[in-house]
Each structure stands twice: as structure tokens, then as C-alpha cells.
Image: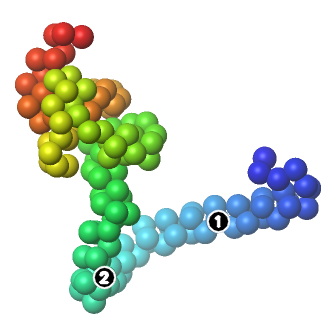
Amino acid sequence: MPYKDPEKRREYNKQYQKTQKNKEYKKEYIENNEEHVKAYMKEYRQKNKEKLKEYRQSPQGIKSNTINNWKQNSVIGDLDELYEKYVNADKCEICKKVFNDTYDRCLDHDHETGKFRQILCRSCNTLDSWKNKC
């Protein structure tokens, strides 16, 4: 429990229940009004091109995009923690080659289970010869 004080706990629980109901309502609304929501989002993106472009280039936008790509590729686990490890990696865990830029770095994962294995350079990731060494 986040609060030991019964009053604070009650207030926290009320707020939590409201947010859960709100999430369910939003999900149901989107399902029932799919065409309207799509049209609204298209119009919003057109009106706010610069704002969205600025967000995508910000550190928060880059992190969000990277994590979403990992989710689409079925990577499982604590993705925030994994992102921090990924960003702070400076060399390949197999050949010890230093990464020159972010394009050299690859997140290796098992495609069947989705579990993260290690952070590799592009050549180690494509060759997969390192698997024989393990």
C-alpha cells in the first residue's frame, strides 16, 4: 500500500478506481467511435506537424519510439530498464567493438520467447556466429 494512514489510503483508492473506470470508458468509446476517432487524430496530426516533429526528436520521443518498436517486435521484460541499459551501452558484448553511433547498436532478443539476450553491434547481430561460442 502506498499509504499507511487510512484516510490517505481511502483517498488514493478512490482516485485509482476513477482512473480505472475512465480507462475502460475511453477504450469502449474508441471501439464504438472508431471512424470519428481516426478522423480526429488525422486532423490533429495535420494541425500539429511541427509540435509532433519536435516531440519525436526529443529524448522522451526517441525513447517512446524505441520502446514501441521493441513492443512490436515482441520484446518482453522491463523495457524502461532495458532502454537505460541500451542507451548506456558503449561496446558490443561479444566482440567488444565500440559503438560509433546509435545505428551500430542492436538489441538482440529471442524471437520465439521475446526475452532480451544482449546488446550487440550490427555485424554480430546479423552473423549470429556468437551463439556457437556460448
The image's mark for residue 36 is none
- Identified at 24% across, 11% down, the residue is 134
Q: Earlier in the sequence, mark 1 or mark 2?
A: 1
Marks 1 and 2 sit apart, C-alpha to C-alpha, by 27 Å
Left or right: 78, with 51 as reference point: right
- Mark 2 element type: helix
Left or right: 16, with 106 as reference point: right
Place of residue 25 in the rendered image (x, y in percent of width and height, measured from the top left): 57, 69
Category of crowding for the residue at label 2, using alpha-carbon neighbours closer than 10 angstroms: few (below 14), some (14–19), many (at least 20) = few
22 or 123, which is in the foreground? 123
Q: Residue 76's quadrant in the figure?
A: top left
Whether residue 63 is situated above or below residue 122 in the rendered picture: below
Q: Which is closer to the viewer, label 1 or label 2? A: 2
Q: Is residue 36 visible?
A: yes
Q: Amino acid at mark 1?
A: Thr
Residue placed furthest toward the right: 6
- Mark 1 element type: helix
Place of residue 114 in the rendered image (x, y in percent of width and height, measured from the top left): 32, 32
121 or 29, which is in the foreground? 121
Q: Which residue matches tag 2? A: 51
Q: Amino acid at mark 2?
A: Lys
Q: How many marks?
A: 2
Q: Is residue 74 visible?
A: no
Residue placed furthest toward the top: 133
- Identified at 20% across, 22% down, the residue is 94
Give the color scheme: rainbow, by chain, secondary structure or one colour: rainbow
Left or right: 61, with 7 as reference point: left
- Identified at 24% across, 83% down, the residue is 49
Q: Which residue matches tag 1? A: 19
90 or 103, which is in the foreground? 90
